[in-house]
Image: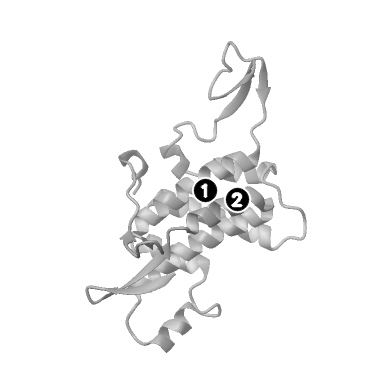
Amino acid sequence: MTTRTNDDKTVYAVDLNCFKEFNAALAEDSDRARVIVAAAWIDKFLEAKLRAEFSKGNAKAREALFSDNGPLSFSAKLNIAFCAGWIDRDVYNDATVIRKLRNKSAHTAEPVSLDDPKTRNLIESLRVPNRQFSDWGDLRAAATGDDLVIYTGDMPENATEDLYIPGLLTFRLAIPLILAVLVSNLGIVFRTDEDDRLYQIKLPKHMGGGE
């Protein structure tokens, strides 16, 4: 996260390449790491918004506020964002689910799997993905000869085999959608090293719903 002064206003900008780093982590890490990384990026974007809003005072006060031992835990940042009206109800719900998964993953010595039934139920309870996939939580897969079809409701007539959708697949479908809506809600500013310009994400109308 970098700081720039733009028209006498302090702007906290996130490197646009962060999404490449995030996608690489989702592709290569363990299920435990994937959950922790997803939560860490939500925390990072919440902090970027808070730093932009709480930019007064002095450096010492801001350092105390945002230090690891400061008052702004992940949960506190999330509650502030929701109560301030910065994020909608669906984003708050989904970030809370991911926070719970993060806590479970970080505080157990047992193996962590996105295929665990309780974990899959939590993933299927996410709300933001419904804006892209109207039947989120009811998605199924089937083989049709040499092809694969994702469906809801009754199995297609030409299906030859019902297939299992891994928890990792649903997680990787959901998290980028949640992050996109989160950063749009928060008005997060991004920058690139190439031109040092500032950017914001604009979502299609069907993704911007929520209260």
Image vertical order of residue 138 relative to residue 61, above or below = above
Q: In the picture provided, is 159 more to the left or to the right than 9?
A: right
Residue 82, percent from left and from top: 39, 60
Kindly identify the amino acid type of the residue bearing the numbered disc 2: Leu
| Depth check, front residue: 32 or 202 | 202
Q: Quick one: quadrant of the N terminus?
A: bottom left
Residue 46 is situated, as x and y percent measured from the top left of the image, at 44, 64
What amino acid is labelled 1 in the image?
Ile
In the drawing, what numbered circle is on residue 175?
A: 1
Q: Earlier in the sequence, mark 2 or mark 1?
A: 2
The kind of secondary structure element at disc 1 is helix
Disc number for residue 112: none
Residue drawn at point x = 48 percent, y = 65 percent = 44
Q: Is residue 11 visible?
A: yes
Decide: is 116 above or below 9: above
Identify the residue at the far right of this view: 110
Give the label on residue 26, or none. 2
The reply to whether the C-beta atoms of the residues labelled 2 and 1 are less than 8 Å apart is yes
* Picture quadrant of residue 188: bottom left
- The answer to whether 145 appears left or right of 70 in the picture is right
